[in-house]
Amino acid sequence: MENSTQFTSFMLAGYSDSGHLKYLYFIIITVLYVSIVFTNTVLIVVICIERSLHEPMYLFLCSLFVNELYGSTALFPALMTRLVSDAHSVSTVYCYLQMFCIYTYGSIEFSNLAVMSYDRYLAICYPLQYNVIMTQNRVCILVCIIWLYSFVKFIITLSLTIRLKLCGNVIDKVYCDNYLVVKLACSTSDTTVNNIYGLYGVVLSVAVPLITILFSYIKILSICLKSSIETRQKAFSTCTPHLASLLNFSFGCFLNLLQSRFDRPMRNVPTVLHTILSVYFLMCQPLFNPVVYGVRMAKIRQACKNYILSEIWMHVMFSEGQLFNVT
């Protein structure tokens, strides 16, 4: 066995010396993060205050948008800080916390998308019974289960990782990755439980949601083939944003998995592109979802317009009132 050391920090080797370009990268990432926070926050507020959006589909969307804020905040502030800093080390406590947030974000995202696909299946295939089956209480219970299950599952994963004796502290990414930390273990025999539970976690977090999604869309497709053109168009309009979101997130997770598990295919990839691909699912998905759902779904689009116009009107009235008081 190699000599193990009690490390107090990890070195993130994914950062490269980009010279003055780091300030350009900092500006780009800052604009991207501000856009993510603004768009997701607006949609969360609109869904919460607009009574016409207090329906199961929009409540699941609200959970999705909250998760986008949660996942992006786990990455962006730290990424922006280290881009302009010469120190690329992080404390072990912060590293484990970041791993917890990023992995639970991924689990919640897949689970939320799976529940949303099942919700669309019920709405399209059982329209008359839909309001009886999918009540607001059941929606709240499902959302709570999604979040609590993801937290509990990764608390176990994290506890298995923390117990390992490590013989290195260099992580070849710009953020902390659980699999790369496990690879730093001094003995492969110590990681057996981690690997078994990791496989179990992948099945529950990815395979089960994907099976639910496939089942839902096979049923939706079979109903649409037997229905009128109007029904098909309605199903298409409600399912397109969900499918686009699912494909985008799955693509990002696949890129991340490819980089973490298979080093050889990524050796010839430029460093900047390598970094972009590794954070794709955390950068693009949080901005992709609010844009896609905000543009494609008429009720959300109209509610956003009404909310923005009312805020502008209130601001104008307040300014005029202040002016009259002064004069």
Image (tube, rainbow, N blue to C red):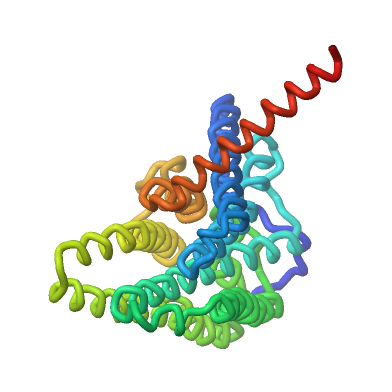
Instruction: Report whether 199 appears left or right of 35.
Output: left
Instruction: Report whether 202 appears left or right of 11.
Output: left
Q: Is residue 255 visible?
A: no
Q: Is residue 65 visible?
A: yes
Tell me where residue 2 appears, x and y as whole percent. 65, 74
Tell me where residue 78 appears, x and y as whole percent. 67, 47
User: Is residue 207 shown above or below 28?
Assistant: below
User: Is residue 103 shown above or below 50?
Assistant: below
Q: Residue furthest top?
A: 327
Could you say which is closer to the camera, residue 16 or residue 111?
A: 111
Could you say which is closer to the camera, residue 162 or residue 224?
A: 224
Residue drawn 61% across the image and 49% down it: 41
Residue drawn 40% across the image and 42% down it: 270
The quadrant the N terminus occupies is bottom right
Q: Which quarter of the figure has residue 165?
A: bottom right
Residue drawn 15% across the image and 68% down it: 228
Could you say which is closer to the camera, residue 297 or residue 71?
A: 297
Instruction: Report whether 123 appears left or right of 52.
Output: left
Tell me where residue 280 appears, x and y as whole percent. 45, 51
Tell me where residue 276 appears, x and y as whole percent. 46, 46
Q: How many marks?
A: 0
Q: Which quarter of the figure has residue 129?
A: bottom left
User: Is residue 286 shown above or below 318?
Assistant: below
User: Is residue 230 shown above or below 280?
Assistant: below
Instruction: Report whether 48 appears left or right of 295.
Output: right
The quadrant the C terminus occupies is top right
Could you say which is closer to the camera, residue 154 or residue 236?
A: 236
